Image: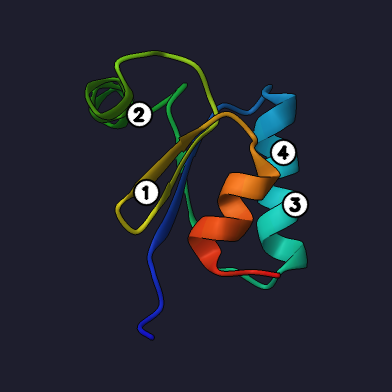
């Protein structure tokens, strides 16, 4: 199975963003971090995809997860 791209839209002060990134690191999942506090274009793209401004938004392949939802992330990443 090809590796899915993982993007984490986050802000530096977001506690749940830190938890989501820690979870990905623990599971040795490479991800691209997108700081929506600084990157206005990325923020607009995130809002367009989700219809809201809350972070984290975790994009795993075609799956969009809003908030730190460990079970949804495990499912999207095929983790046990």
Cα–Cα span, label 4 and label 2: 18 Å
Instruction: Check the image and report above or below for 70 versus 54.
Output: below
Cα–Cα span, label 3 and label 4: 6 Å
Which mark is on residue 22? Answer: 3
On screen, residue 48 versus residue 50, left or right, reads left
Which mark is on residue 18? Answer: 4
**Numbered disc 4: secondary structure:** helix
**Numbered disc 1: secondary structure:** strand
Q: Quadrant of residue 50?
A: top left
Q: Quadrant of the C terminus?
A: bottom right
- Residue marked by disc 2: 39
Which residue is at the far bottom? 1
Q: State the residue at coordinates (29%, 16%).
A: 51
Q: Is residue 51 or residue 18 the one in the foreground? A: 51
Q: Answer with mark 4 or mark 2, whichever residue precedes in sequence.
A: 4
Q: State the residue at coordinates (29%, 53%).
A: 62
Q: Quadrant of residue 13?
A: top right
On screen, residue 27 versus residue 77, left or right, reads right
């Amino acid at each position: 199975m090809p590796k899915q791209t993982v993007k984490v839209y986050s802000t530096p002060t977001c506690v749940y963003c830190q938890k989501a990134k820690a979870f990905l690191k623990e599971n040795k999942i490479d991800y691209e971090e997108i700081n929506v506090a600084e990157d206005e274009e990325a923020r607009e793209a995130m809002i367009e995809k989700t219809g809201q401004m809350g972070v984290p938004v975790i994009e795993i392949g075609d799956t969009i997860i809003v908030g730190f939802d460990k079970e949804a992330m495990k499912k999207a990443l095929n983790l046990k």
